[in-house]
Amino acid sequence: MPSRSTGALRRLNAILVGLGLLAIVGLHAPSLAHEGHDHGAPPAAVTTSNPRVTAQSDAYELVGILRGDRLVVYLDRFATNEPVTDAKVNVTVGGDEEVEATAAGDGTYMVASSKFGGEGPLELIFAISAPAGDDLLIGTLQLTARSRAAPPALAGPAALQSLQNLPTIRIGNADVPTIYLIAGVALALGFLLGLAVRSRRKLVPVSALAFLVLVVSTAYALSHEGHDHGNEAAKAALPAGDTPRRLPDGTVFVPKPSQRLLAVRTTMTKAEEAQKAISLIGRVIPDPNRSGLVQSINGGRVIAPENGLPRLGRQVRKGDVLALIEPAIPAADRTTIAERMGEIEQQISVAEARLRRIRQLVERNAAPQSQIIDAEIELEGLRMRRELVRQNRTEPEVLRAPVDGVIASARVVAGQVVQAQDPLFQIVDPKGLWVEALVYAEFDPARIAGATAVAADSTPLKLAFQGFSRTLQQQATVVQFAVEDAPTSISVGQPVTVVAKNGAPVKGIIVPRDAIVRGANGEQVVWRHTDPERFEARPVRTEPFDAARLVVSAGLSEGERVVTRGAELINQIR
């Protein structure tokens, strides 16, 4: 029969094993209880640090934020989200106190009342008088206690949930909670104790040591939790500040002060009939009748003129001297020219001597006067030939501006050696620019009804169709447009996107291009203004309309507010 000590050891073994199992089950209980309790995602609630009141109508949208004992009212137009700066706002507080709001001039109004220091719901009635129209808005301000309550103690499911926030130990590539190790040690010691009992060995000191390790380690874990993680829970219980953030349901909370800083603007959608368009790849080129190139015919060394070489962007007139080119003469040509100059000089000397002899004969009446005239003419001709040869050898080539305009490009410096037909200067009239686009058998260029273009910096361009080529270039038809009222920010060679109208009319919602942004998954989305301080992303399908707008063919319906300015900034909020 087993002794009494053996029975005690067995009972101690059972206690240790039970404690280990209880620790493991207790760790899994919070997650299981939580999983069984919460199966549906609750609607996202916005927690802010300041009580607020919201109200809206077809004309106005109002948000009031309580700061201390003053209510700051943000008044905007409902359709466009533009601040209303010229309104007069009277507020009825609690149904019996009327207060006139003080306008700040930037669309905000200040309201002061002693009732803002109370607690509970407070009804506010805003009477708005403005040149755009009068309106009456009603809202409720939920007041909270001024004193800060102590953080509640953790109990029930919250206490079980806090057990998961325990210190861990790195084992291999996994982080194992310390309490798991404690439970494992307890089970192992219990197993060893069972073997000892079965082999009739008295290992009471071992069992006592196991129990001591379990008690001390559990106390350390719980005390560590209460010391560190309790502070984190308290911090999480604090209300979030009035900062833009993305909510769990995917919407974005943007408080009215942040909307003012981001200059968020909206528009009401409506269905319109638009002509179908297509996008083309193009680039800016100069008007061939209002631009020109400056080149050297023979080449040579560049010489700066008296006023210096023209700089980029300089305004020039037709005929202005831009540069001088000193011709480069080969050694063989120099020898030929030198020999030619020697022959002419010799002929001039002979002609001068002959003229002197004829004059002496004429003075003696031995020769007629006509011989002097013939000799002078011959001498003058030889001198002219000598001058021409000298000029061809030393006279530089003068480069002049062919048209009026500005220097668009200059590729010369003093002393540079250039070849014949190298483009040295390009002169462009900034008001005379064209756009050249390529059409790859997408439609008939002869049926283009109108076109616009947009540059990389979103600058819109109004285009006038000029014509298209009858020969293919790189398997494409070249189409040219003239830019009407070209902006000064456009440069020659700049790539643009041409939107050409050439199709049947379609019905859809037309929105600015700035309203369309890319979502996290790469699809096109617009941001709907659902509530005064909440925005929702909506996937859409678009088609080109013109340089500044797109046609939304799916994803939007009439009467919705979409963000037209600031959508990219809202899209970046996380």
Image (cartoon, grey):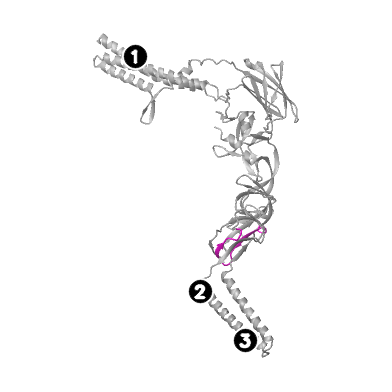
CB under 8 Å between callouts 2 and 1? no
Residue 15: mark in rendering:
1
Q: Where is residue 403 in the image (x, y as percent from the top left)?
A: 66, 59
Task: Specify the amino acid type for callout 2.
Answer: Ala
Q: Position of residue 562 (x, y in %)?
A: 65, 35
Tell me: residue 330, above or below residue 545.
below
* Residue denoted by label 2: 332
Q: Quadrant of the C terminus?
A: top right
Tell me: residue 538, above or below residue 217.
below
CB under 8 Å between callouts 3 and 2? no
| Element class at badge 1 | helix
Is residue 306 shown in magenta? yes
Q: Position of residue 251 (x, y in %)?
A: 58, 30
Question: Which residue lies most toward the front here?
Answer: 364
32 vs 384, left or right, is left
Q: Earlier in the sequence, mark 2 or mark 1?
A: 1
* Residue denoted by label 3: 357
- Decide which of 53, 317 is in the foreground and name it: 317
- Decide which of 304, 290 is in the foreground and name it: 304
Task: Specify the amino acid type for callout 1.
Answer: Ile
Q: Can see residue 501?
A: no
Residue at coordinates 64% horizontally, 78% vertically from top-left?
Answer: 380
Q: How far apart are marks 3 and 2 (CA)?
A: 38 Å
